[in-house]
Amino acid sequence: MTDAVGRPLEHERAVDAGTPLIEADRLSIEYEKTRERTRLLALYDFTLTVPAGEFLVIVGPSGCGKTTFLSAVAGLVAPTSGSVHFEGAPVRGPGPDRAMVFQDYALMPWRTVEKNVRFGLEMAGRRGPRHNDAVQSYIELVGLAGFEKSYPHELSGGMRQRVGLARALVVDPKVLLMDEPFAAVDAMTREIMQGELARIIQETGKTVVFVTHSIDEALTLADRIAVITSRPGRLQEIIQVDLPRPRYEKDVKASPRYQELREHVWGLLQQEVSQNLRSGVE
């Protein structure tokens, strides 16, 4: 693991340089492929730390274990070897301190926007006026005021993803685990949602671990980018993103530094994708 060349980033958000919020130590995760009666090694000897307050973006070739890592942090899959710690304690299962935001929205079609956002609170037994206020507050934060009584089929893809984000935020998790949340929307909506997410995270100060295949999305959002090797996934490089915010402005994306970082990330990914093609990895 090496550091990318470049200047140190002056964070606009508070990042706790003390004890990591998330720490994966030599993590390996292997799955059993039932039909083939074989084993698939998704992650191998994977080591990564995430401090509180950081926006970490993970990129890598398809099938390299990015989602597997999120699932391990969420407590949805267990390590085969190594460990994952959250706030210094081993991850033993899911908890309200870690919230997942999925690519496919995962909304309940029979529930309104308000009731979808409220779902996590209900599961945690949190009811009452204070929680009603929280639901409304986060609906407003994600820009859905006026759509409280609407159903998912009445919303655009971007609006549905806003509901998923509000549902994750309302339980006040310490970290958001986001698995390609904007992959299913059109290019224009995706750029708008990137800007909205950056604003929301700036306002809430949440820690985020975000998976994407888009280099531009990574550069727009990240404090750091973790580049993962082809399967089995290992940490190839950590890149500090020393660009001013907001980064969706044209002058930032046209800057020499932006292009330098983009080419650097692309070079790392191109090397891994080429290796996949030569070895026949899907």
Image: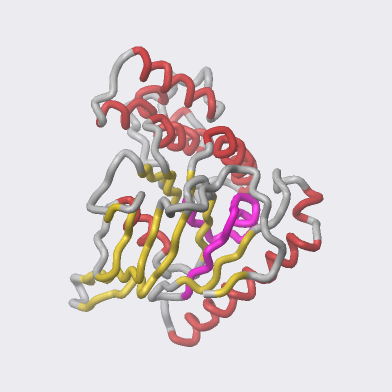
Q: Residue at x 47, y 47 (%)?
A: 52
Foreground residue, 172 or 197? 172
Tell me if 152 is positioned left or right of 247 in this view. left
User: How far from the left and from the top, in percent, is residue 102?
Assistant: 41, 47
User: How far from the left and from the top, in percent, is residue 146?
Assistant: 52, 17
Residue bounds of the magenta highlight: 209-229
Residue 27 appears in the figure? yes
Would you identify the image quadrant in which residue 33 lies? Answer: bottom left
Foreground residue, 59 or 37? 59
Tell me if 62 is positioned left or right of 194 in this view. left
Residue 188 appears in the figure? no
Q: Is residue 20 magenta?
A: no
Quadrant location of the C terminus in the rendered image = bottom left
User: How far from the left and from the top, in percent, is residue 139?
Assistant: 48, 25
Question: Going by the picture, which residue comes out furthest to the front?
Answer: 18
Q: Is residue 113 above or below residue 6?
A: above
User: How far from the left and from the top, in percent, is residue 232?
Assistant: 38, 75
Q: Is residue 39 above or below residue 214?
A: below
Q: Residue at x 53, y 38 (%)?
A: 205
Q: Residue at x 34, y 41 (%)?
A: 97
In the rendered view, how is the structure colored? Answer: secondary structure
Tell me if 171 is positioned left or right of 93 in this view. right
Foreground residue, 229 or 202? 202
Q: Residue at x 33, y 53 (%)?
A: 88
Q: How many marks?
A: 0
Question: Going by the picture, which residue comes out furthest to the bottom?
Answer: 278
Q: Is residue 282 above or below residue 66?
A: below
